[in-house]
Image (spheres, helix red, strand yellow):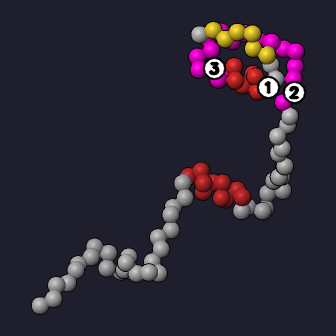
Amino acid sequence: MEGKQLSLFPNLENQNDKNYHKKAKLGRYEKIQYELNNNDSDPYKKFIKIEEKPILKSDYKFIDLFCGAGGMTQGLVQAGFKPIASVE
């Protein structure tokens, strides 16, 4: 006598089938982004080409008090400012 496997979902296709592919569900923000990108009815939708601008050198100098890990210092250096001191 051969055993029969019971299933909670008898109407679904066999998951071991080669043609069975489960589609991943999009997350909340990915779904919103997908809907915005595929909506061509918005007359105010504009695409802008963004390019990196060269770092501008300036004569501004700064002192960073309570700098912690130095995130603010790094941002100001990337903006072209010159650090004098960083103190924790």
Q: Residue at 23% x, 78% y: name it.
A: 6
In 3D space, how far apart are the residues under numbered discs 2 and 3 (Cα atoms)? Answer: 21 Å
Q: Quadrant of residue 74?
A: top right
- In depth, the one of 16 and 31 nearer the eye is 16
Residue to which mark 2 is pinned = 56
Residue 44 visible to the viewer = no
Q: Residue at x 59, y 10 (%)?
A: 88
- The magenta stretch spans which residues? 55-72
Residue at left offset 59%, top offset 20%? 69
Q: Is residue 20 above or below residue 28?
A: below
Q: Are marks 2 and 3 in contact (CB under 8 Å)?
A: no
Quadrant of the drawing holding the N terminus: bottom left
Disc tally is: 3
Q: Position of residue 42 (x, y in %)?
A: 79, 57
Residue 87 left/right relative to 11: right
What residue sits right under mark 1 in the picture?
Answer: 79
What crowding class fits label 1: few (fewer than 14 Cα within 10 Å), some (14-19), or many (20 or more)?
some
Answer left or right for 24 relative to 44: left
Residue 55 place in picture, x, y as percent: 84, 30
Could you tell me how far apart the alpha carbons at marks 3 and 1 are, in whole angstroms? 14 Å
Position of residue 14 measured from the top left corner of the image (x, y, whole percent): 36, 80
Outermost left residue: 1
Residue 37 sits above or below residue 23 on the image? above
The residue that label 3 is drawn on is 70
Q: In the rendered view, would you say 14 is above or below 81?
A: below
At x 82%, y 40%, the residue is 52
Q: Secondary structure at mark 1?
A: loop
The amino acid marked with disc number 3 is Gly
Q: Which mark is residue 17?
A: none
